[in-house]
Amino acid sequence: MARLPRLSLPGQLHHVLLRGTGGQQVCTDDEDRQLLKALLAQHAPENGLELHAWALMPDHIHLLLTPRSVEHAGDAAAHAPGLSAFMQAVGRAYVLAFNRRHGRRGGLWEGRYRSTVLEVEPWLLRAMVWIDTHPQRSGYLAQGAALAHPWVSAAHYLGQVHDKSLTVPAAYWALANTPFAREAAYRTLLEHGSAPSHAAALTEASLKGWVLGRADFVAGLQLNTGRRLHKAHPGRPAGSGRVQP
């Protein structure tokens, strides 16, 4: 079965997954991660993107972002800002630097990134927690150590660092009225982690490219794209969407 076209809808929240080809490492040490983080910070505003959260794993990366620029097709796409241009700019620059530093040749990435759209309420904070606890959930860190991990975006939201590359979403501001209270509220969310049903839904949406949201949200997006946005269910009319937990 052919892969579905990747989603890039301006003004919508996207989760993006980019993996190393054949499961190979894409970040071997902190110098690699610092370079990749710098490229994300450089190219996001250049391509009209708001970056909300990120996790730099040894063999893949997760990004939570909102494109503000409209994608273009055909020849116009080569010089137009947007999600595809952002991923190409970051991916190419990083591979060149990575190969030069490690004395290697050839490609690094799986070939194409995966992306899906999430409905902001209630999925934005759920996705942030899912991304910021990914090293712990994947077994790279001991239980509880994710809060101190320097290569996820959590440190910014916990008040430990100031990351200029991040655009803080409204859902985070709504957690509390003061910076200290917001940081404490987000720390509590991280300590509780992702509910199994939320983690399963986010994983499926990421890998298969289905929109994650309520049926009316999915149906509304379907009006603006010819790409199927949800898994087909026997006995359900096309475009009806899937009600998520």
Image (cartoon, rainbow, N blue to C red):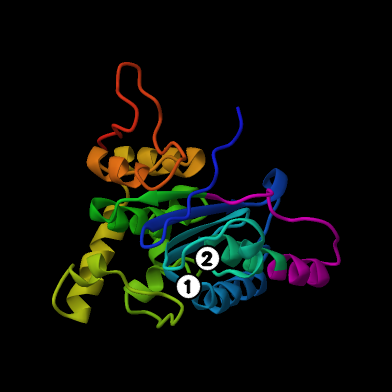
**Residue range corresponding to the magenta coloring:** 93-114
**Can see residue 142?**
no
Label 1: few (<14), some or many (≥20) within 10 Å? many
- Distance from the alpha carbon under mark 1 to that under mark 2: 6 Å
> Residue 70 in magenta?
no
Q: Is residue 112 above or below residue 45?
A: above
Q: Quadrant of residue 100?
A: bottom right
Q: Which mark is residue 122?
A: none
Q: Is residue 159 left or right of residue 101?
A: left
Q: Quadrant of residue 65?
A: bottom left
**At 50% from the left edge and 40% from the top edge, which residue is drawn?**
207
Q: Are marks 1 and 2 in contact (CB under 8 Å)?
A: yes
**At 57% from the left edge and 75% from the top edge, which residue is drawn?**
43
> Which residue is disc 2 drawn over?
82
**Can see residue 20?**
yes
| Near-viewer residue (27 or 88) | 88
Check the picture and name the quadrant holding the C terminus.
Answer: top left
Check the picture and name the quadrant holding the N terminus.
Answer: top right
- The x and y percentages for residue 74 are 64, 56
The kind of residue on which mark 1 rests is Gly
Element under disc 1 = loop
- The x and y percentages for residue 48 are 47, 72
Q: Is residue 10 left or right of residue 20?
A: left
- The x and y percentages for residue 221 are 34, 47
| Near-viewer residue (153 or 234) | 234
| Near-viewer residue (40 or 240) | 240
| Near-viewer residue (78 or 24) | 78
Element under disc 2 = loop
The kind of residue on which mark 2 rests is Gly
Q: Which mark is residue 48?
A: 1
